Image: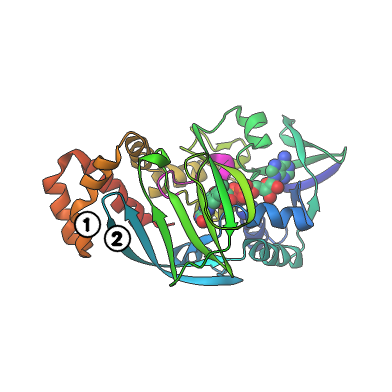
């Protein structure tokens, strides 16, 4: 039976980051990264699941940096019912995600890591080791295991026996459209059931998405896909020497749908915890981090119950461009929406 010090299941943002940092911290460690997809299927999967990453994210991920940047972003535009348009300065990037992941995987390989195409079909613990049964027919043994296998994580199901508290199904399109300016656009309203519609520049095209069945696109469609965003966090994300990271741990923020940053950062944090063989350190990081604050889920549920009139009322004072002043006014004039304003401020501080 093949034996490794650490196996990472899933080579997306979370798993690629975890594998990279494991070899960065412990070059002597024997690390295997497996993904069920490779080549064009891997590229398609990752092209269709989000590519907007903030500058802050890469600050936390050094020595990794924003590579394969397709667009610089310096502005987030929010359009609310009632005609309110808010602009928030926020620096970030639209990256070519498959190429970014490959470039990090190359650095992992150059440090002696092993990357293979294979799918984990079953996981169990025996005599202090994790045994991973794969679609290739082999069984791999490992001292440490990282589950980075996304929303339907096999590692989560077999080792933790849990499911994400909430899964938001979305549809995303690449369309013939120009999104002018270095900005990303979010459109809010009751039709999005607590979520929103996003419009990002995507090379010569635009990327448009929304919760499934809530809207349509008028533009000519180049590509279309349906995808799930797991959110709400889990009660446990470390068990023995097994760690869940990224979507496998339901880490995306329900208010922003941002999950790339927490995926990559959790990969790094899991690698750090493995370095010290301290799963409590990883659990502690997540519990105390602003990313896991319950206000985001509460705000999502509140938004899901708001009418367009209530959206418009809650945003009325934000039309004048001075956000800090508008925030103070709103807290005073509309106490019924204070929880939403605070969640929004927290979300702006945390970023995406
Ligand atoms: C439509 C959409 C748009 C989004 N937009 C953004 C955005 O703009 N910015 C942002 O920050 N976040 C965005 N998100 C969220 C973000 O994409 C995810 O949170 C992020 O991709 C999570 O990364 P991950 O590595 O945990 O999981 P994934 O990206 O899902 O990667 C999981 C990997 O595991 C592999 N895998 C799965 N099962 C197995 C198995 N059994 N064995 C081996 N390999 C397996 C898969 O092939 C895949 O490569 C978006 C999500 C969606 C759905």
Residue in view at x 27 percent, y 55 percent? 83
Residue 113 drawn at (x, y percent): 75, 59
Query: Left or right: 214 with respect to 148?
Result: left
Image quarter hosting the C terminus: bottom left
Residue in view at x 58 percent, y 63 percent? 176
Residue 140 drawn at (x, y percent): 81, 41
How crowded is the residue under tag 2: few (<14 C-alpha within 10 Å), some, or many (20+)? some
Q: Main secondary structure of the magenta part?
A: loop
Q: Is residue 164 magenta?
A: no
Residue 104: mark: none
Residue 118 drawn at (x, y percent): 80, 45
The residue closer to the viewer here, 247 or 28, is: 247
Q: Which residue is mark 2?
A: 86
Q: Can residue 143 be seen in this snapshot?
A: no
Residue in view at x 88 percent, y 37 percent? 137
The residue closer to the viewer here, 177 or 227, is: 177
Q: For mark 2, give the secondary structure.
A: strand
Q: Is residue 246 magenta?
A: yes
Circles 2 and 1: CB distance less than 8 Å?
yes
Q: CA distance from mark 2 to mark 1?
A: 7 Å
Q: Which residue is mark 1?
A: 318
Image quarter hosting the N terminus: top right
Q: Can residue 119 be seen in this snapshot?
A: yes
The residue closer to the viewer here, 71 or 245, is: 71
Q: Which residues are magenta?
A: 245-256
Numbered circles on residues, count: 2
Q: For mark 1, give the secondary structure.
A: helix
The image shows residue 254, relative to residue 159, as above or below, that is: below
Query: Left or right: 286 with respect to 22?
Result: left
């Amino acid at each position: 039976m093949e034996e490794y010090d650490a196996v990472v299941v899933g080579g997306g943002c979370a798993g690629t980051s975890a594998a990279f940092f494991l070899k960065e911290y412990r070059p002597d460690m024997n690390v295997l990264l497996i993904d069920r997809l490779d080549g064009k299927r891997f590229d398609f999967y990752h092209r269709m699941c989000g590519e907007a990453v903030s500058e802050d994210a890469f600050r936390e991920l050094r020595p990794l940096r924003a590579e394969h940047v397709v667009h610089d972003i310096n502005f987030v535009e929010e359009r609310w019912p009632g005609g309110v348009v808010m602009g928030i300065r926020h620096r970030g990037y639209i990256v070519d995600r498959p190429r970014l992941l490959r470039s990090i995987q190359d650095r992992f390989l150059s440090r002696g890591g092993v990357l293979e195409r294979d799918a984990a079909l079953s996981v169990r613990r025996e005599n202090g080791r994790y045994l991973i049964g794969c679609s290739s027919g082999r069984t791999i043994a490992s001292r440490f295991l990282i589950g980075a296998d996304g929303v339907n994580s096999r590692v989560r199901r077999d080792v933790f026996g849990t499911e994400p508290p909430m899964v938001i199904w979305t549809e995303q399109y690449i369309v013939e459209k120009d999104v002018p300016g270095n900005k990303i656009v979010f459109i809010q309203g009751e039709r999005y059931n607590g979520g929103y519609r996003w419009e990002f520049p995507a090379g010569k095209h635009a990327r448009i998405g929304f919760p499934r069945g809530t809207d349509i696109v008028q533009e000519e469609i180049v590509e279309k896909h349906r995808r799930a965003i797991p959110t709400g966090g889990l009660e446990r994300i470390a068990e023995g020497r097994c760690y869940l990271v990224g979507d496998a741990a339901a880490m995306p923020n329900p208010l922003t749908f941002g999950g790339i940053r927490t995926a990559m950062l959790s990969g790094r944090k899991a690698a750090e915890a493995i370095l010290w063989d301290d799963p409590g350190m990883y659990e502690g990081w997540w519990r105390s981090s602003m990313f896991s604050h319950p206000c985001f889920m509460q705000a999502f549920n509140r938004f899901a119950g708001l009418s367009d009139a209530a959206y418009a009322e809650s945003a009325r004072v934000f039309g004048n461009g001075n956000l800090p002043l508008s925030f103070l006014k709103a807290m005073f004039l509309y106490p019924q929406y204070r929880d939403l304003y605070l969640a929004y401020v927290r979300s702006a501080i945390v970023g995406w």
